[in-house]
Amino acid sequence: MKEDFGPQHDEIKERRDSISVKGGQKKQLKCDTHSVSGCVSQRACVYCGARVVLNPVTDAIHLVHGPIGCASYTWDIRGSLTSGSDLYRNSFSTDLQEEDIIFGGEKKLASSIDELVAKHKPRLVLVYSTCIVGVIGDDLDAVCKAAAARHGIEVIPVQSSGFIGNKAAGYRAACDVLLRLSLPQTANPLPKQEYTINYLGDFNLAGEAWMIKNYLAEIGIKINVVFTGDSSYETLQKASAASLNIIQCAGSMTILAEQMEKRFQIPYMNVSFLGMEDTAESLRKIAAFFENEEFNKSTERLIAREEAKVGHVIESAKQLFAGKKAAIYVGGGFKAISLIKQFREIGIDVVMVGTQTGRKDEYDTIGELVNEGTVVLDDANPSELEKFMTEKGAHLLVGGVKERPLAYKLGIAFIDHNHDRKHPLSGYTGAVNFAREVESTLCSPVWKYAKEDPYHG
């Protein structure tokens, strides 16, 4: 069976293999490729991918080597909370001008590093390259190496220039930096700590890393380092002592986990603390890894207690949301999978699922979870999102900041599941917050004032 995506997609035939309808397309969905020229991709750039991963390192100077717009766009890009330094909340830029671009910006970069080190006395400086730096050819490695020698601190270039890929390439650049920071400062490897894990891919939005830390502490398991929520130069250097790595954001951190397994012999597993089902499953997986019966018992007690607290909220939501349909468009495939399950928990059918950087195995899982007729798409553009949400009658879109205006223009409710939120969506508290946020936006009286209201009534 061949899908009909409508006349508006006839001009962009290269996109056809990146869009499928469950039950209608037998061949594998095309993914993990460059964006198609002529499409307004919702993906972020290489620099942005690196910045969102590294920005929560709290005591680092984050210096953007490029025009002021790059630093302005990503200022405070993660709503991460800190228990220590708040230096990361600043956004520093070399503010390259026309003269710098013509004659080179290396001297300006060196001067900026000197000024920031003198003022803030950091132990770590991260210098991000941007599109224009890749074009003019400034040697970040040489400038950072010289600055590190002058000041006796770590000054690390983040190779995140544009035109070398997409947001996923930025993740790889960030993981290269994090692996370098994780290397022990001594000749001997750090001794392994029993019942200790690193938590990869959590950025402590609204204190979520602290919540999961408390869950695991109750079981008897200690979090060693979080990558990168509430992390610091000193804590990152202890990462090789962990017995296990768990990954929340697979898209950004799988590369790092693979390298740490190779370098430090730390096994890893994917987890998700989004929704009651995945939270319970993840806690059980972590406890089972350590083969400690007391951990298993503590886990079951924790799950039973927390589910008893929040179960009535979830059941009430199911009745309230009967017949409602949701669309998902997020960064990674693993988050999309969790959101499909979470919507299922509260009785909402998912009719469209898309990601910016999903992988083949993740799309296979998505295909197994969704119902017949659900549209699945990789690296979508606004035209496609509008088309399929409209055709499928979605009442709600969950996505990031770039998708918000589109949803509201279409008269569709919206939930931000990305950087900008100030309330936790992880764990059992997050499951309740998610259900209540869905209710507040989906059932808002504002929809009755919409001029065209095809879905709300």
Image: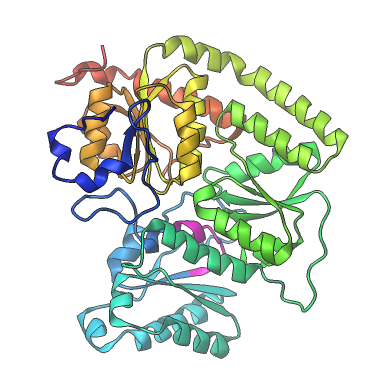
Residue farthest to the right, as pictured: 293
Q: Quadrant of residue 255?
A: bottom right
Q: Provide the major secondary structure of the magenta segment.
A: loop
Q: Quadrant of the N terminus?
A: top left
Quadrant location of the C terminus in the rendered image = top left
Q: Position of residue 399 (x, y in %)?
A: 37, 38
Q: Judge left or right: residue 186 versus residue 67.
A: right
Judging depth in this view, the residue of 23 and 284 nearest the camera is 23
Residue 175 sits above or below residue 155 on the image:
above
Q: Is residue 238 visible?
A: no
> Observer-nearest residue: 38 or 280?
38
Residue 437 x/y as whole percent? 43, 26
Q: Give the x, y percent position of residue 67.
A: 28, 71
* Count of numbered labels shown in the rendering: 0
- Identify the residue at horizontal 54%, vertical 17% (top origin): 314
**Percent coordinates x, y for residue 61 in the rendering:** 50, 70
Q: How is the image coloured?
A: rainbow
Q: Horizontal placement of 74 versus 262: left or right?
A: left
Task: Give the residue drawn at x 27%, y 50%.
Answer: 41
Residue nearest the viewer, comparing 95 with 103 = 103
Does residue 295 lie above or below 260 as drawn? above
Residue 59 inside the magenta-drawn segment = yes
Range of magenta residues? 52-61
- Residue 416 found in image quarter: top left
Which residue is depicted at the point 55% across and 61% down?
57
